[in-house]
Image (cartoon, grey):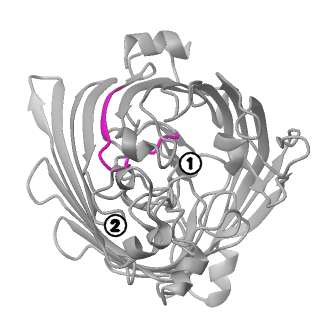
Amino acid sequence: LSIAAAAVCAFSTSAYALKSEDRVVKGNYQVEYTKVPGDVNSITEMFTEGEVYGRLRSNMFWWDVDNPKNNSTADHNVWGLGGSLIYKTGYFHGFGATVGFYGTVPMHDENVFPGTTTNYTKMGKDTFHTRADGSEGAMGNFAEAYGEYKNGKTNVKVGRQGIDSVMLATNDTKMIPNTFEAAVIENKDIPNTTVRAGYIMSQKLRDHQSFHSIIAYEKYNENDDSGAHKGLTPSLISGAGEDVNPEMILITAQNTSVPNLKLNAEYIGLDGFFNTIVAEANYKIKVGDSWTVTPGVRYLKQMDDGAGAIGGASLSGAFKGNTTWTGANGGYTDPNSADGSIIMARLVAANGPLELSAGYSEIANAADIIAPWRGFPTGGYTRSMAQVDWIANTKNWALKAVYDFGKAGLVPGLKVAADYENMNFDDAKAATSGFTDRDIFHVDAWQTFASLPNTEFKFRFATVDADPSVGDTIDYNSYNEYRFEVNYLF
């Protein structure tokens, strides 16, 4: 059904959402609470008038590798069962609190090569806790626990929380969200403007049991996300006299003062490492009676403040500690600088149940972009599922579409999306990290039924046709991936 529907359309990140009487789970897995506890008259009532929000999840993955490679990749399957319980208090003089417990249990055999500690689960690993001995275990933690204060158009949250921006995201596509220990203040006093500032101290990745450094790379213990900079290790960071657990400053702003024009800006700063700014504009134009066309541009600038000297220009860590790479520094202009940038553009056309878009992103011929916080620098423009397309001198283009069969009156509760992305890497730089040119086709399908309220079934499929890694004669990079998820809100 998904493939047939994709033939009618072609994808975009959908605005589709699973809705209940008190929550909306958006297509990007952000949870929006539409019904929350109100003001109360005493501290006791804060707790007696609180609300509990439950969620049950089943998440299955099948990974079909074109050419399995010993002690590296192999066909595998993953199945996790879990859920969450979120408790929100009432608000007494503007003060309230939220606590969220999340858990998951692996229901499959461990995917470890015989006689080794090498786990080959790869894409589905965030469904459970992957340990240093290669084994896969159950996980449960309080990923959320924050105090909150509301006063007029100002909101303050302090503690463990999800943060969503261009560079950071909860990205709850597996079983447990990516969250941060932070203090965040948001204000809407300026007309048509939202300003937010955050002081972020640590991060907990989706498959980690505890919070850790937001930038230091160490497999299993620190930030080992797919977008992590492998050259920024704890030993090299401390050896350079920098803090292994630095704080991040986050500032975002959005303005909609001009009709149909949305302006966004973002800044992240890690003292002693780098600073990044993002600017974006999207302008919606009405065409005829039923179509809208929205051109958009985004520019990202990463400015080195010491990360290049510690870890080098490549996310692979090939130049960590000022290592010299054989072969003209792997194609990097300055292998010990983290200066980099991206320019992106897209065009989105929408008409009722149909949305079409085309996007392009070009990463400057400088350093790779550092973004291990599950926000994706090219997200919404080119990035397809499970891809890292912000390596230096990479050029990407994508065609996307989404079609809502329910909104069209054809199949109630069905929405289908698909995308195609072409990623063209700089071969010299790809040699340092194993990235290769590739074509990706990806399909999502969501289905809800009136007879099963608060329940959603989701199917995802991706096929990757990649070139062999530099120096290989066999392609070990191509694969097919299947995902099936069930969500129930209570």
Give the magenta part as a residue range: 386-400
**Residue at the (35%, 74%) spot, across then down:** 274
State the residue position of label 1.
Answer: 21
Q: CA distance from mark 2 to mark 1?
A: 47 Å
**Residue at the (70%, 47%) spot, across then down:** 125
Kindly state the secondary structure of the residue where label 1 is placed: loop
Relative horizontal placement of residue 483, taking residue 129 as reference (left or right): left
Specify the principal SS of the magenta part. Answer: loop
Q: Position of residue 482 (x, y in %)?
A: 64, 27
Q: Is residue 308 visible?
A: yes
Looking at the picture, tell me which residue is in the foreground, 384 or 26: 384
Circle 1: residue type:
Glu
Q: Quadrant of residue 404?
A: top left
Circle 2: residue type:
Ala
State the residue position of label 2.
Answer: 338
Looking at the picture, tell me which residue is in the foreground, 167 or 148: 167
Tag 1: Cα neighbours inside 10 Å, few (<14), some, or many (≥20)? few
Q: Position of residue 10 (x, y in %)?
A: 37, 20
